[in-house]
Image: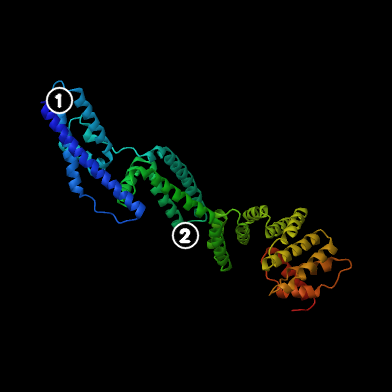
Amino acid sequence: MMYDLHVALNYYEDLLTTLEQVAAQSAQRRSRRVTNAQPAESPDHPEQLQREILKLLRSRDAVQAILMTTPKVPTETLLRLMRLDDRLRHQSGLITATLALDNWRASIQPDAAAWWWSLQTPEHWFTRLDWLWEMLSLIFLTVSVSLVVVISTRFLSGGPDVLGALAIVGQSLLTLLTAGTLTASGRKALEQIFSQLGGLGLKKHFWPVAKLALSLTLFVTLILLWSRLPDISSFFHDRGLTRYSAGELANAQSDFERAASLDPNNLPAHYNLGRLHEDLQQIEPARTRYLTAAQGEYAPAYNELGRLSLQSKKLPEAAAFLQRGLELVAQLPAGDERNHTTYALFKNMGWVRLNQARHIEAKDWLQRAIALDSTFPSPPAAAHCLLAQVLEKKKPPDNAQLEWEICQSSLVVRHPEEDSWYHIARQRLDQTGKP
């Protein structure tokens, strides 16, 4: 019996030595490819290597079978077996990478004590950092999901459309793909994908890092989208202006609301929403939007707030709003917006002083507004209408016929008070026989 055991051990050792040589040759080939960038040499045929490993494992079965029937095995023999088994465990990486041991165990049903049929891939040193990769993945995914919720809510403001729907669907798909790492089924699906990528060099110990890379990619994508929200907001605001000019008030309102939601600091979007609400005679919503824009120190919003306060006969409040607007208007870039805002502030301040019976001040403010007529292709006439009223109320009154003529011929009615001024101009001119 001892003779049979020695023969079995020798055979086991020979097969083990052969496998070790194959492993050493493979390591040398990999080293040469890395250092010299040489093309890979032809490796041993996979099926041949599988047969050699199976013979090795079966030889270990034979050693175990003889060992169990041999009484009083010498200590030296047992020590030799232990050394050989250590060498076998050292080759577990090559064995598990070549053979699907789970399938073989299901086929041959080895004894539960036959540990060599249950070898595991040795733990790579890189796996010691798995806790770090998992923690970072969880952090990035948590922040990403929060960003998706916030961004999607902002895109949905003003109602769904094609661009908003595409943005939401894209974010949701990215989140679902990476958030799958948090569930058992999601992890299993990702691992199947990673196993298919094994041929491209994605080893199992790098899978947690690959999951982290997916989470980081989602996070960076959403951060970039977040940083571009002001630009997207500007797009919707500009489209809203086009639709507003074309009389498409419902579409314009949707664009302005989305622009304001995507970028709360888009002050022109809040301001133009106020104008649109006022066109629809929704005064309180308009005032709210103007106040929001005014909180950002937007000069045109202060002008509109002053005008609404003036209409409500809150003259000191109106003057305060207009004065703040005059302080801010100089910060606007030179151009049509600055000219229109300056004109409106001068005109409305003159209107306030007219209602306060401070006629000299009113005349001064209105003349400053009229001095800007040359900056407009079609000079506005509202200041002329107010100046005509100021001239009539002075003591003694001045001749206001010329101002009434300009008011009647050039006034474009945009607000209720302007309709009243136009009517007064018609009355005055009828009294003088002017058409």
**Residue 17 visible to an observer of this rendering:** yes
Q: Position of residue 389 (x, y in %)?
A: 80, 67
Extreme residue toward the right, this view: 396
What label does residue 68 carry, if any? 1
Q: Secondary structure at mark 1?
A: helix
Q: Nearer the viewer, residue 298 or 90?
A: 90
Q: Quadrant of the C terminus?
A: bottom right
The residue drawn where x is 44% and y is 57% is: 166
For badge 2, the amino acid type reads: Leu
Position of residue 265 in the picture relative to residue 111 (left or right): right
Q: Nearer the viewer, residue 372 or 139?
A: 139
Q: Position of residue 413 (x, y in %)?
A: 67, 68
The answer to whether mark 1 and mark 2 are in CB contact below 8 A is no
User: Pointer 1: residues within 10 angstroms few (<14), some, or many (20+)?
Assistant: few
Task: Identify the mark nearer the N-term, 1 or 2.
Answer: 1
Whether 353 is drawn above or below 47: the answer is: below
Report which quarter residue 62 is drawn in.
Answer: top left
The residue drawn where x is 22% and y is 34% is: 116
| C-alpha span from label 1 to label 2 | 74 Å
User: Pointer 2: residues within 10 angstroms few (<14), some, or many (20+)?
Assistant: few
For badge 1, the amino acid type reads: Met
Report which quarter residue 332 is drawn in.
Answer: bottom right
Q: Position of residue 314 (x, y in %)?
A: 75, 54
Q: Position of residue 113 (x, y in %)?
A: 21, 28
Whether 435 is drawn above or below 188: the answer is: below
Q: Which residue is mark 2?
A: 163
Position of residue 26 in the picture relative to residue 356 (left or right): left
